[in-house]
Image (cartoon, helix red, strand yellow):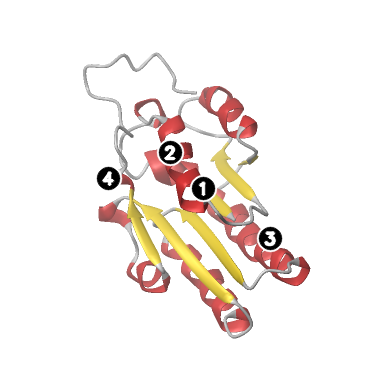
Amino acid sequence: MVFIDMPNVHYKRDAGPRRIRWHQLRAAIENLIAGTTRTYAGAYFERKSHLPGYADKVRPGFLKAGYDFQSYNKSTDILLGSDLWEKTVEAIVAGKFDKLRIVIVSGDEDFARPLGRIFKKFGSALTIEIVVVSWKRILGQELERLATQVVYLNDIHNLEKRENEQFAAASP
């Protein structure tokens, strides 16, 4: 299961969405979920983005990769947190697997509570792995504590465009 807080990838980094190579992020995530049963993948973006229309340039690549692309008028954290709980519980109840890997691309402390509840409610019935993908400087302590594995966006090769590259060309 994959949940991407798209604004967290660029807003918190002060990079702006045009500085992120979104295809590099997708590839890194695919490596993290390789060999697991993929039950849900969602990418969450704010409609009120400070760069109108940018989501439309990013969306096709995620849709093609099988992501459910969600946009929300308010903070994406509300929708993502709700889906994190709902989709995970649905997968556990319907699934026939004894191990579940949840990849959350966000450093927001807001997601520690639903993840903690998932561990508490289902952790004795199956193995739950939480992989948190975040920038180093914004990873919340509680989220880091719950994580089985932490992958820093800072360490994903070639994720950000260099200063001298054209910002006008959007990555797919």
Residue 137 image position (x, y, % from top left) = 25, 54
Q: Residue furthest bottom?
A: 124
Q: Is residue 71 above or below residue 95?
A: above
Q: CA distance from mark 4 to mark 3?
A: 28 Å
Residue that badge 3 annotates: 87
The mark total stands at 4
65, 108: nearer the viewer: 65
68, 48: nearer the viewer: 68
Determine whether label 4 and label 2 are within 8 Å by CB: no
Residue that badge 2 annotates: 25
Determine whether label 1 and label 2 are within 8 Å by CB: yes
Q: Is residue 107 left or right of residue 72?
A: left
Q: CA distance from mark 3 to mark 1?
A: 14 Å
Residue 154 image label: 4
Determine whether label 4 and label 3 are within 8 Å by CB: no
Q: Residue furthest right?
A: 94
2, 46: nearer the viewer: 2
Under mark 4, the amino acid is: Asn
Under mark 2, the amino acid is: Leu
- Label 3: how many Cα within 10 Å (few below 14, some 14–19, many 20+): some
Under mark 1, the amino acid is: Ile
Q: Residue furthest left?
A: 164
**Precedes in sequence: disc 4 or disc 3:** 3
- Label 4: how many Cα within 10 Å (few below 14, some 14–19, many 20+): some
Q: CA distance from mark 3 to mark 2?
A: 22 Å
In this rendering, the label closer to the viewer, 3 or 2? 2
Q: CA distance from mark 1 to mark 4?
A: 16 Å
**Precedes in sequence: disc 1 or disc 2:** 1
- Label 1: how many Cα within 10 Å (few below 14, some 14–19, many 20+): many
Q: What secondary structure is found at the residue carrying circle 3?
A: helix
